[in-house]
Image: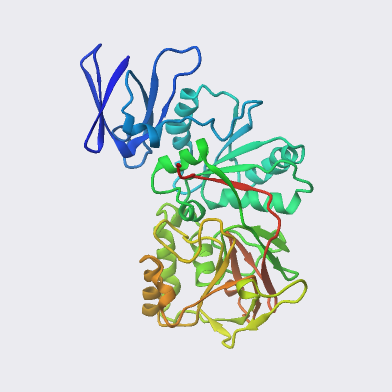
């Protein structure tokens, strides 16, 4: 069935002369217009999000209609003239979809069936593989068994992550920990399905489903900045919600690579405490719930003062070679110490307003012990376009790295967070973060049209 198409206000009205059918589509719900395929005479295809068919808990369906005419005003922003990023004229790039079944509230499978399967069908593409996570190790195992060997063999590949930040972090850590000689840098397309979605929020991929899909179809591959976190002997991964010293069965941890955040203090504690099934069902609200318990302990005690020494290295590009300019902060008590490569930890939580998408700048946000009401006030300002950095109690600085030495007898206060992973440092230990010089992965970002 072919439709005639006309622009009316902010909508497209499509009518069929064959049957009395009329479709009204908001322009913001149009993904793209696909030109006729060679050997087909069905006209252009208009692909759009059918939001009316989705419930509050489900993503919209992707639909298609064939057009007899295409309004000229739609062409500049919607006509897909370029070959998709994951395909070239010589051979198809290996396309992998990773469906993280445990991310966020478990919507990744619906996103694939509602959006990606129809899109691949409309594009007549069938050279892709789908991988569903079976455990927390699935993505890491895929990297070691499939993605890294392909990259080392020089085979181009695009990895579509239907996950939260954890999926990206698993790929980063696996590649930087194990890859030896990358001959073809993989492209990563993010489709946010997690709780915080920090990387996707910071790179403009959460405003609408269209943004993430257009990044996959015709995005610009951009190197992913990475940091390396090194730990003193005895540091171990801890399980979700664990607050005591790790058991002998916990995995040791000496070095972890990340691309989002490294923290100690309130942020690390609330990430660790909220990572349970009881909390996860509340989505992003779980972080606020855990923060409330940490700031207003149910036993009536005051919120914890985190004790240790914080040393900052080479701010604003200072320090060359093996010589690092170091500054140890005078205060030995802290409430919040966080370093990040991104601007937003959630869609509206702008923790580092001066950070630009994938600019490689590592910035530290730190403040000391404050009354709970003041802590909540400072953090609430981050939801107001990052105004917390203007608070006199907040230190905000670009650095090359930092080091923390712990002076905490109780294990729960020595937990640190690296991109959602929780690591507990042994008593008297330390951890250090440094920017990584290698670039082994690229993220697809929506490219502005000329």
What percent of the width, then of the height, locates residue 97? 57, 36
> In the rendered view, would you say 399 is above or below 74?
below
> In the rendered view, would you say 33 is above or below 153?
above
What percent of the width, then of the height, locates residue 221? 58, 45
> In the rendered view, would you say 382 is above or below 136?
below
Which of the 4 image quarters holds residue 316? bottom right
Q: Nearer the viewer, residue 434 or 57?
A: 434
Q: Nearer the viewer, residue 356 or 251?
A: 356
Please, which residue is most extreme toward the bottom here? 330
Is 161 displayed left or right of 227 in the figure? left
Is 372 displayed left or right of 443 in the figure? left
Q: Quadrant of the N terminus?
A: top left
Q: Nearer the viewer, residue 29 or 338?
A: 29
Residue at coordinates 49% horizontally, 51% vertically from top-left? 200
Q: Quadrant of the C terminus?
A: top left
What percent of the width, then of the height, locates residue 133? 58, 40
């Amino acid at each position: 069935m072919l439709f005639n198409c006309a622009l009316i206000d902010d909508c497209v009205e499509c009518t069929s002369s064959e049957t009395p059918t009329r479709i009204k589509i908001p322009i913001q719900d149009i993904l793209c217009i696909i030109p006729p395929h060679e050997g087909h005479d069905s006209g252009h295809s208009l692909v759009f999000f059918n939001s009316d068919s989705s419930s509050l808990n489900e993503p919209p369906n992707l639909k298609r209609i064939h057009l007899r005419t295409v309004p000229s005003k739609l062409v500049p922003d919607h006509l897909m003239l370029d070959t998709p990023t994951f395909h070239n004229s010589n051979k198809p790039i290996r396309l992998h979809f990773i469906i993280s079944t445990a991310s966020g509230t478990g919507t990744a499978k619906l996103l694939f069936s509602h959006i990606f399967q129809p899109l691949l069908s409309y594009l007549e593409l069938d050279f892709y593989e789908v991988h569903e996570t079976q455990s927390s190790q699935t993505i890491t195992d895929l990297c070691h068994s499939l993605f890294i060997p392909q990259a080392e063999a020089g085979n181009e590949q695009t990895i579509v992550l239907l996950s939260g930040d954890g999926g990206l972090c698993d790929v980063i850590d696996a590649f930087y920990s194990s890859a030896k000689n990358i001959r073809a840098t993989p492209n990563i397309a993010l489709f946010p399905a997690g709780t915080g979605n920090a990387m996707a929020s910071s790179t403009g991929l959460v405003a609408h489903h269209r943004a993430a899909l257009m990044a996959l179809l015709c995005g610009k591959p951009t190197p992913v900045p990475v940091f390396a976190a090194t730990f003193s002997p005895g540091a171990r991964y801890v399980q979700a919600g664990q607050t005591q010293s790790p058991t002998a069965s916990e995995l040791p941890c000496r070095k972890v690579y990340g691309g989002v955040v490294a923290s100690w203090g309130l942020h690390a504690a609330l990430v660790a405490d909220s990572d349970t099934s009881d909390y996860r069902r509340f989505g992003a609200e779980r972080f606020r719930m855990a923060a409330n318990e940490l700031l207003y302990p149910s036993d009536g005690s005051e919120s914890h003062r985190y004790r240790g020494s914080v040393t900052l290295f080479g701010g604003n590009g200072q320090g060359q070679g093996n010589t690092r300019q170091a500054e140890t902060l005078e205060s030995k008590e802290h409430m919040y110490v966080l370093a990040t490569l991104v601007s937003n930890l959630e869609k509206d939580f702008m923790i580092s307003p001066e950070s630009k998408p994938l600019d490689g700048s590592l910035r530290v946000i730190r403040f000391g012990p404050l009354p709970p009401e003041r802590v909540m006030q400072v953090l609430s300002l981050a939801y107001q376009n990052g105004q917390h950095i203007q608070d006199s109690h907040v230190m905000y600085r670009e650095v090359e790295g930092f080091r923390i030495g712990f002076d905490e007898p109780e294990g729960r206060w020595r937990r640190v967070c690296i991109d959602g992973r929780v690591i507990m440092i042994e008593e008297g230990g330390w951890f250090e973060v440094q920017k990584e010089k290698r670039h082994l992965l690229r993220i697809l970002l929506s490219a502005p049209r000329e």
